[in-house]
Amino acid sequence: MSFSWTGLVTVLLLQQRVRTNEPPNVIFAMADDMGWGDVQYNGGSALTPNLDKMAQSPNTVLLQRYYSGGPRCSPTRGTVLTGRNHNRYCIWSTTGGNSQPDFKEPEPQALPLSEITVAEVLRDHGYSTAMFGKWHLGDFKPIPGGNKKWPVSHPGLHGFDQWWATERSAPTCTLNCGCFSNVTCLHGHYPNKTPACTNYYTQQHHSDHIVGWPNATEGDDSEFIWTLTEKYIREQVKIRKPFFLYLPFHTVHVRYIATEQYRSLYLSKNCSSDQADYYGAITALDHVMGKLRNLLGELGINNNTMLWFTSDNGPARDSPGSTNGLRGHKSSLYEGGVRVPGMIEWPSVIQENRRSQFAVVSSDLLPTVYDMLGAKPKDDRPLDGISVLPFLHGNVDSRNNTIHWAFSVNANFSGKYNVSAAGDHYKIMTVYNNDEIQSHQLYDLWDDIGETVDLTEKYSNISDHLLMEVKKWRASVINSVNNVGCLNMPLQ
């Protein structure tokens, strides 16, 4: 039998063509409370060699103006899934408590079941969907005092076929140890605090019955998420099914605790116990991101996988976290609260490394997925994000769309609250008192990244334009709230 090199090359080219014609996989990995300056490539103290390697990849766009959709946990998680600002469906701030045992404190702010999520859209287009990590968008079981309209709002009700999730924040190490007797918990720099029972849960056979992980997950929590992730990805590759994987890590939210393997790296550098836990937890997460990228390469699917990495907001005020000079922190609409590490790696689309000032926000994921699929939204509900696909292809270099935030909003938009808007160059910060803007400041994000000089008087025309944008957007949000019906009484 004769051998033909030409025939072999033809077969390989055909196989490659089949692969590139397959729907792209989508992975959205998100740290918790990781500041813009917490990664090495932005001057951070934590060792993040794998994230640095991803940032330097020839197939990565490093987004130096990546924004979280909100300045706290739950708001940003809502924007990731819906493409819409969290205030449009009454997630005003963080839902529920962080330190109570499971199912003891309700989450009155829940992601409405009427919202269309990126998981639902991709599942409708033949994708497998999975989520492993922190949910923080509603109760898994009905609890007195919880959301009256959506008393249960877990990942399985929002498009995820497979999920293991915590309701809210959890320790970054030795999870579930408060739920089981005779389990040794790692306390790190929290020697006087006993962990509450915080577990991973899922639906049992897609029923209404919620079950917990059957034992303590000893070791680093990011590593536990990795074991679920690796198993899931290998399964999808085996059955040749495109997948969407949402990975909302707990790191580096309190209680941040590192294993001795990672704590020792920083204790040996004379870091405090607090710093050793914080930086060590980040390095553990970095290690998992390295394993994820290696797995995609090993399985030959990295070329056709759009991989996002980011954080849900800036660092907590009382943590060792860093904004590297940005003003503000978690819970603030200044840059330190919402500008976070961000990058997208996608070899089939991105062929050269770019370090970009193009503004991207977490609500851009769903519009980008619509564009990737060649699909249209099911209805005319307003989306706050845009597709960044043209930018990833190198066809545009400016956003030409204003990014908006609103925080500390009361359910009836009364009292004082903050609304801000950022364009390609300038950002306006406003303080509302009921329906009126009480004060505002204008900042140049190109020349004043620390937001130190108010340019309102110098550039009154730019300020007036952005104020009009804020007012129009606020009116649109109030209209959405009324349409969603997440309040008992419509807003006027």
Image (cartoon, rainbow, N blue to C red):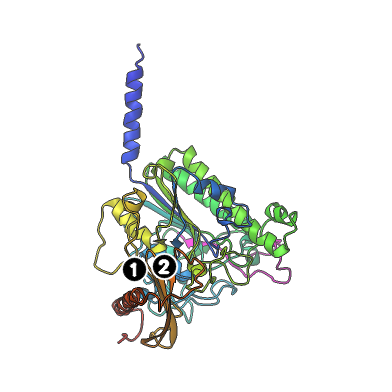
Counting residues from the start of the chain, the first of labels 1 and 2 encountered is 2
The front one of 253 and 269 is 269
Q: Look at the image and tell me in which quarter the C terminus lies.
A: bottom left
What residue is drawn where x is 45% and y is 71%?
138
Q: Which mark is residue 15?
A: none
**106 lies left or right of 283:** left
Q: Are marks 1 and 2 in contact (CB under 8 Å)?
A: yes
Q: To which quarter of the image does residue 238 belong?
A: top left
What residue is drawn where x is 55% and y is 49%?
52
Q: Which mark is residue 78?
A: 2
Return the residue found at the far front. 458
What crowding class fits label 1: few (fewer than 14 Cα within 10 Å), some (14-19), or many (20 or more)?
some
Q: Does dot 2 land on a helix, a strand or a loop?
A: helix
Give the image location of residue 283, x and y in percent. 62, 53
The residue range painted magenta reads 180-204
Residue 98, placed above or below residue 163: below
The question of residue 131 being in magenta is answered with no
Residue where numbered disc 1 is placed: 115
Give the mark toward the camera: 1 or 2: 2
